[in-house]
Image (tube, rainbow, N blue to C red):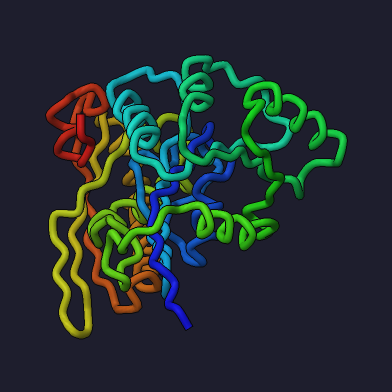
Amino acid sequence: MRKKNHKSGFVSIIGRPNVGKSTLINALMEDKLSIITSKAQTTRHRIRGIINGDDYQIVISDTPGILDPNYQLQEVMMKFINETLIDSDILVFIDEVGSKEFKNDSLIEKINKLKVPKMVLLNKIDLFDQNKLESSLIYWEKIFPEIKIYPISAKEGFFVNELKEIFINSIPESPPFFPKDQFTDKSERFFVNESLREQILLNYDKEIPYSVEVITEEFKETSKIIKIRSIIFTERDSQKKILIGHKGAALKKVASNARKNLEGFFNKKIFLEVFIKVKKNWRNDKLSLKRFGYNL
C-alpha cells in the first residue's frame, strides 16, 4: 500500500472580539491553548497551536479581535492580523450569529482578493434560533459572495471535527514545520504570563485588565517543582493599589488561581512569586512594548 504524502499548512483565524476564536482553537486542539474570558481584547498576541497527525500538521493562529486601534498596543495587535493575511494557507473569518454590521471595507476587500482557500464561520448557533441564523447567512453572503459559510458552535463542539477534516484536505503537501511533539510556538514563560493575565481579566473590572502586562523573569524547573517569578506591570499607582487589594487579598487570589491552573498545565508542582510594578503609559511606549514581546 502506497504511503500518503505528508501535508502541512498554516490556518489563520480572524474575527471581531469575543466571537469565539480562542474557544474554537481550544476545541480543535482538544486542549487549552488560549485564555478565554467575556472581555474584549483577551487575546493580544498571535498564538500558534500545532495539531499533529501521522501524515499531517496543522498550524493554527489565534489572533486579537479586529478593532479600530486607539493606542500603540492596539496598533501592534492589528499588525498581527495583517500578517496572517500574508502567510496563510487557509483563512478563516469567524463571527457570531446575529452580530452587528461589520464596518471594515478595506479588510473585506483584502479577504475577498486572497487566493488561498477561505471560509466564514457563524459561531454560537446554540444561542440563536433559525430565523437569526438565516438572517446572518444572507448578510454574510452579500459581504463574501464567493466564500463558503458554515454554521458552528465551538463551545458545544458542533462542526469542529468536520472543520478539522476540511483543513486536512485543504492544506498543501509539505514536511512538518515543527517537531511532531510540539503543540505551540510559544514558550513556557508566555503561558505563565497568560495564566496570570487571565486571572486579572476574570477578577477585575473597568480599565484594570487593559492596563496590565505580565513578564516572567524567572522560570526554573527541576524534577519535582517549577519555581516562577513574575511581574505584573500597570500604568498608575492607583491601579497598583487595586490589584493588590486589602491586605494583599486580591493579588493572593490571582496568584493562587494562576498557580493551580499552571500546575494542571505543566503537570508539576509550582512555586509562584508575583510582584507589581508601575510603568506609566506603557501601552503607548515603543520600548516597553518591545520588552513585552510585541514586534513593532
Going by the image, does 186 lie left or right of 30? left
**Image height of 57 relative to 81, above or below:** below
Q: How many marks?
A: 0
Residue 259 image offset from top left, x and y in percent: 34, 66
Residue 294 image offset from top left, x and y in percent: 23, 36
**Image height of 34 relative to 280, above or below:** below
Residue 94 image offset from top left, x and y in percent: 58, 39
Identify the image quadrant of the C terminus. top left
Going by the image, does 115 lie left or right of 238? right
Residue at (35%, 72%) from the top-left corner? 263
Q: Nearer the viewer, residue 39 or 3?
A: 3
Q: Residue furthest front?
A: 2
Visible in this render: residue 240? yes
Residue 153 image offset from top left, x and y in percent: 68, 51
Residue at (44%, 41%) from the top-left corner? 42
**Image height of 191 relative to 81, above or below:** below
Going by the image, does 103 lie left or right of 11? right
Residue at (48%, 48%) from the top-left corner? 202
Residue at (55%, 36%) from the top-left corner? 93
Visible in this render: residue 53? no
Q: Nearer the viewer, residue 103 or 114?
A: 114
Going by the image, does 89 lie left or right of 266? right
